[in-house]
Amino acid sequence: MKQLKLKIIILFLFFGALAYGQQFSYKPLNPAFGGEVFNYNWLLNSANAQNGFTAPRNAAEEQSDLERFGENVNSQILNQISRALLAQQVEAVGDFTQEGTFVFGTLNVEVFESDEGLVINILDTSNGEQTQVIVPNS
């Protein structure tokens, strides 16, 4: 029994001498949190390599010349139609150089002269949005 106790004590002393403590310290990798600045490129490349998402492609870049030409002709025709409709409405109401209040459907347009120039206030009565255009004096 004494020999067993002695062997156990010797084992504890032997392994106790081998076991020693050390001081743990943490140093972050990310430079945003105090890590080494040179880790930035490595972290960015690692994140980009793991990124499974791709940015959506621009439809204009994938169009052929013929498709872009057709789209351009379409937009020019729509612009001419909208200009013609606007000219008809303005002729029906009057010239914006005269002061007064005009109504275009749900839009109330108020025109008056001020020190800054010709002021045009536009109010959309359907949703309450308002904008102001100032044409400076020449």
Image: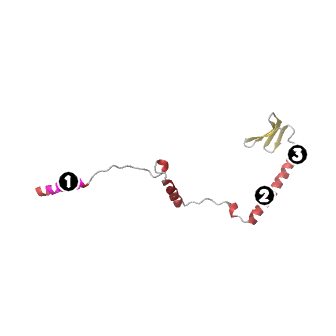
Q: Quadrant of the C terminus?
A: top right
Count residues near mark 2 (Cα–Cα under 10 Å), then give few for <14, some for 14-19, many for 20+.
few
SS category of the residue bearing label 1: helix
- Residue drawn at (70%, 61%) of the image: 60
SS category of the residue bearing label 3: helix
Give the magenta-colored segment's residue range.
6-17
Circle nearer the N terminus (1, 3): 1
Q: Is residue 74 left or right of residue 27?
A: right
* Residue 15 within the segment the image draws in magenta: yes
The label shown at residue 92 is 3
Q: Are marks 1 and 3 in contact (CB under 8 Å)?
A: no
- Residue drawn at (72%, 66%) of the image: 64
Q: Is residue 1 visible?
A: no
From the viewer's perspective, is residue 134 above or below residue 37?
above
From the viewer's perspective, is residue 13 above or below residue 104?
below
* Residue 98 within the segment the image draws in magenta: no
- Residue drawn at (49%, 57%) of the image: 42
Circle nearer the N terminus (2, 3): 2
Please name the amino acid that badge 2 sits on.
Ser
Q: Nearer the viewer, residue 47 or 112?
A: 47
Real-space Cα separation, disc 2 to disc 3, in angstroms: 26 Å
Q: Which residue is mark 1?
A: 13
Q: Is residue 93 visible?
A: yes
Please state the horizontal and vertical placement of residue 57, each as a whole percent of the image: 64, 60
Q: Which residue is mark 2?
A: 75
Real-space Cα separation, disc 2 to disc 1, in angstroms: 90 Å
Circle nearer the N terminus (2, 1): 1
Please state the horizontal and vertical placement of residue 121, each as a whole percent of the image: 78, 39
Give the label, 2 or 1, closer to the camera.
1
